[in-house]
Image: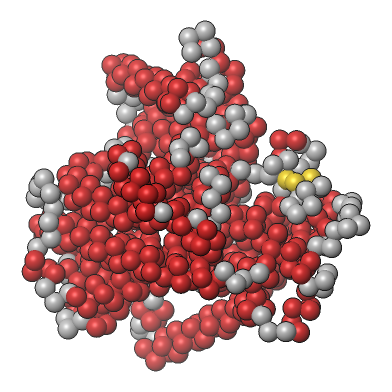
Amino acid sequence: MGELIFLAIVGIVGVLCYNETLSYSVAEYDRTGGPAMYPQLVLILLFIALALRAIQILMKKEKPKFKWFTLFKGTRGVFFLAFVLFVFLMEPLGFVVDATLFLTGTSLYLYYQTTGDKTLGGAKAITLKVVLFAAFNTAVFLFFTSVLSVGVPAGILSFLF
Amino acid sequence: MAEVMAATLLDPMFYLFVLLGVALGIIFGAIPGLNTPVAIALVLPVTYSLNIAHTCALLMGVFMGGVSGGLISAILINIPGTAAAIATVLDGHPMAQRGEGARALALGTFVSFIGGIFSAVVLMLFTPVLSSFAIQFGPWEYFGVTLFALTLVITLMEGKMIKGFISTIIGLLLACVGMSPIDGTQLRFTLGSLNLAGGFDIILVVIGLYAFSEILVTVGDLKEDRTVVKYEKKWFYLPDKRDLKGQGGNILRSSIIGTIIGILPGIGATVAGMFSYTQAKRFSKHPEKFGTGCPDGIIASETANNAVTGGALVPMLSLSVPGDPSTAVILGAFMIQGISCGPLLVTQHLDIFQTVLVAVFVANIFMYIVQAGTIRWTAQLLLVPKYTLMPLIVAFCSIGAFTVNNRVFDLYMLLAFSVLGFLLKENDYPLMPMVLAFILGDLIEPYYRRSVLYYNGNLLNAFTEFSLGTVFVVLAVISPFLGVAYDKYKKKKRERAAAAAGPEQPEEAQE
């Protein structure tokens, strides 16, 4: 049932997209079919593919279980949440601070999950990690901004960089 | 042209980038859970500020190193670093267990180099031939070839053809987002956001769908119980002459298999390694030794999987159709650099083609030197804990994605692609066709619309006269049906074999 819901969602998105293509105008001089023709063709193929998969599922005696929420469970869920926070805090905090927090937090959490060591390696190891990650992120920041000449958010450290 | 070649060969930075690429590729290839497309995606942002020669050097280095690096973990920890090295495990690890790890590593590295060089020669000889043939192609022929490549990839998805079909279509739709090509007048599927006017950037799609989804899968199952089998430490691992004696046929056959499989889109190094291994066993005088630590097995697997590299570059360079996921990402990187692959690359931009060739040859040579000279340290990297490695890769890839357009919006897109990629991967939807379709989608629509123009607004006119494009389109349409028929035939054959084997051995027969 889960996969059928997934197929239905994809199908609804497809219908909405198809509906949008109906509003595309074609220039009089355009003899290539206009901007709508190709996506409409692709969407029709999508509907066929979805229908075929739905039939395939319905014909199976044992319905395959669709994994919707494994991303949000356990260790993976925490890691993903940290990743989301990392993305959303990138601009306000800046890359160096944001990435140092993300790397320290996730690596300590994953270390604990893997080894079960509640001390997280001890205060010395944690401090070393923070220092190393901060140094790594500063180096990456400087590499992108100075060597490759591309902008990276400096955030709260903008007075430094 | 000779000046360009000379300039490339005399540029020390060129060698430095090959070296960096090879080293990174070997590391990513060696560490299970990471792979070559992820490594290529990681260096994509760096290529922005590089010139074409340095970009080629870096990408080819990563590509050659990545495919080869998988053998280290396959032999030393019984886990293939990349799927391409699956067959290497079968004989490599038993050899390591009986104290011949160094011998297996040296042999695997050497034949990887031979396979890579063989396919590079084929690349050098075959690409101009295919290009001169393809120069006569019009948009309809290109449309046919590109469509055929996509359907071939779907057809080869044994057991999940429809899922591959859905995946491909989603990839094509993702490529439709943004300004329409040819007319350039219509914004499509942008939800009113100007941030999507230029469509999705290839880096976001590749990193999100391919790299991050893989990392999210790995993070959910972190096990640090790897133990490296003890092996003889050397400064440079040269193969034992005894292992190569009488192996000419095996090496040549495996090189040919790998190169041909590389040329065919969507099959890849994993199949090449396995197929070559089974063929080597079939032709061997002592097939019973395979799987017990037989050097012939390592030779077959490693020669073939590295021979795929040059083969996969042939259709990418001559037809703009990538042969495997890595070349799909490389094609995207070339697009970013403004390099248009296809027959004109050889005929009108020979300098770029020659630069790629030089990069491939140098990368293979460096791959051998670096791998054979650093195995003792690379093996230590296998023990680098993933709880540190995975967050580091995420942080580095994210900043790379951010620098595409210097906007946070791209990071949100990266997040969205990661979720989509993970959801599909978890539910056994293949991601490779989606990435391939996304990259080819940028080409296929203009070909399609120009074909419509060429045939006066009605593509049915294409079927009234003989054209190679029509042949490819027909092949594209019928190949999935042939695939289904072949799958059914194989299933029946398996069932017959199971019935013949009797009720006591059904599982074995099914295998």
**Residue found at x 75% / y 46%:** B179
Does B58 sit above or below residue B342?
A: above
Residue B308 in view in this figure: no
Whole-percent x, y for residue B334 in the image: 51, 49
Whole-percent x, y for residue B52 in the image: 46, 44
Judge from the rendering whether residue B343 lies leftward or rightward of residue B407; answer left or right.
left
Closest to the observer: A28 or A67? A28
Judge from the rendering whether residue B434 lies leftward or rightward of residue B113; answer left or right.
right
Whole-percent x, y for residue B79 in the image: 30, 55
Q: Quadrant of residue B434?
A: bottom right
Q: How is the image coloured?
A: secondary structure
Give the residue furthest to the right.
A28
In the rendered image, the quadrant that contains the C terminus of chain B is bottom left
Closest to the observer: A37 or A50? A37
Does B67 sit above or below residue B119?
A: above
Give the residue furthest to the top.
A159
- Labels in figure, total: 0
Judge from the rendering whether residue B137 lies leftward or rightward of residue B308; answer left or right.
right
Judge from the rendering whether residue A159 lies leftward or rightward of residue B141; answer left or right.
left
Whole-percent x, y for residue A67 in the image: 58, 52
Residue B236 in view in this figure: yes
**Residue found at x 65% / y 75%:** B469
**Residue found at x 23% / y 44%:** B378
In the rendered image, the quadrant that contains the N terminus of chain B is bottom left
**Residue found at x 51% / y 47%:** B333
Does B506 sit above or below residue B341?
A: below
Does B319 sit above or below residue B45?
A: below
Closest to the observer: B399 or B348? B348
Q: Quadrant of residue A124?
A: top left
